[in-house]
Amino acid sequence: MPAPATLLRNHEGGHAPVSYLELFFDLVYVFAVTQLSHHVLHHMGTAGLAEALVLFLAVWWAWMFTAWAANWTNPERGPVRIMLLLSMLASLGLAVAMPRAFDAGGGGDAMLFAACYCLVQIGRSGFVAWAMAKSRQEHWRGSGARNMIRITLWFVASAPLWLAGALVDAPLVRLGLWALALTVDYGGPFMGFAVPGMGRSQPEDWDISGSHLAERCALFIIIALGEGVVVTGTSFAQETADLARSLAFVLAFAGSALMWWIYFDLGAERGARHIAQHAQPGRVARSVYTYLHMPIVGGIVITAVADALLLDAPLAAAKLPLVATQAGGLLVFLAGTGLFKRPSSPHGNFPLSHWVGGGLLVVLAALTLAFPLPAPVFVGATVLALLVVAVWEWASYHHHGSALAEDQG
């Protein structure tokens, strides 16, 4: 067994590459995102959407903290590989349980979901705390290990709420308990993971490779977009490829392609450069990547549901479920990408193109609800709104060679 000190990455060399094991780990979350979109598709009511939000927040938090762990530890070492593979197994159990996690009656898949979530969070964080405590480097052995112990204790504190929620019979009570558990989990970073007698985390405790975390989050965007492509392809393959359905297929793909363009043409590279050059990359990673990527991923997942609805009835009038998921999903996506791009923009402003695109989506949704349009016409109009955003950014940054026109919003 290698010396414990070798279980940690060496960040002094700059960029920490994403390992093949991390990419393998992400495959579980492709499945989890697919499960999530199916839950939204089949539970379009208020309660179903609230359940989907809780499931999404749990999935994101499990993946994100594992990304942080892989930033600190070296996936090429045997013990780290075992930790990541066990986390992958527990994550797979979590994903399998998602469709029936809110079924009436305690135990069953609800317990599987809660137990797997707690195992991922507590087991992984505890392992990293151990690896840091055994390090020969004073920083990791001292403040780094204490930071991870505090994080582990916060996940331990939320575990009873997760398990209690899984045991209750009523889905609404379970929803409330799990929402409370997520409040604890998400509140930890805002509270500095404060623990009586152990203090709270400081910015210098979050010594990370910023470019590594930026790349990991960009890859998760690819996961979400890829899931949308899978939903589109699967829905299209299940029915006869007539003209209307073929048009719907093209529109769904165009929407996914434009979301890729809007995120990756400027945002991903500029964001990675911003975090890599920042004096406190941990602070940027927490705000810009840990939190602000949630609406980006969430918007993509919601839009994938709209793609399935469109392909299911390509000649129908656009009704509330399609309008809400298509326009709402794209609005959430644009809000997330705009907030993500804001810190790294030359003037620190929310992109004007995203304001305009969001405004167009609101107008289109309102008009369609008042005067129902055919579904392909409505979706096509929203895709054109995305095209406006993409072309605006392209012209501002590439053709004119200046960020000024884009960054005045």
Image (cartoon, rainbow, N blue to C red):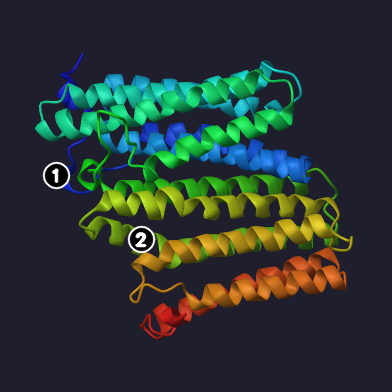
**Does residue 172 appear to the left or right of 350 in the view shown?**
right
What amino acid is found at the position of numbered circle 2 in the picture? Gly
Q: In percent of the image, x 72 and y 56: which residue is there?
A: 325
Say which label, 2 or 1, has the lower sequence index. 1
Other residues around mark 1 within 10 Å, as few (<14) / some (14–19) / many (≥20): few
Most distant residue in the top direction: 1
Q: CA distance from mark 2 to mark 1?
A: 21 Å
- 53 is higher (above) or lower (below) than 255: above
The spot of residue 10 in percent (x, y) is: 17, 38
- Picture mark count: 2
The spot of residue 143 in percent (x, y) is: 18, 34
Q: In percent of the image, x 26 and y 52: which residue is there?
A: 281
**Does residue 382 appear to the left or right of 262 in the view shown?**
right
Q: Which residue is mark 2?
A: 271
**Does residue 383 appear to the left or right of 89 in the view shown?**
right
The spot of residue 150 in percent (x, y) is: 31, 30
Disc 2 element: helix
Whether residue 193 is visible, yes or no, is yes
- 89 is higher (above) or lower (below) than 398: above
What amino acid is found at the position of numbered circle 1 in the picture? Glu
The one of 190 and 140 positioned closer to us in this rendering: 190
Label drawn at residue 60: none
Report if the CB atoms under discs 2 and 1 are less than 8 Å apart.
no
Q: In percent of the image, x 57 and y 60: which residue is there?
A: 333
The spot of residue 224 in percent (x, y) is: 56, 47
Q: Which residue is mark 1?
A: 12
Whether residue 93 is visible, yes or no, is no
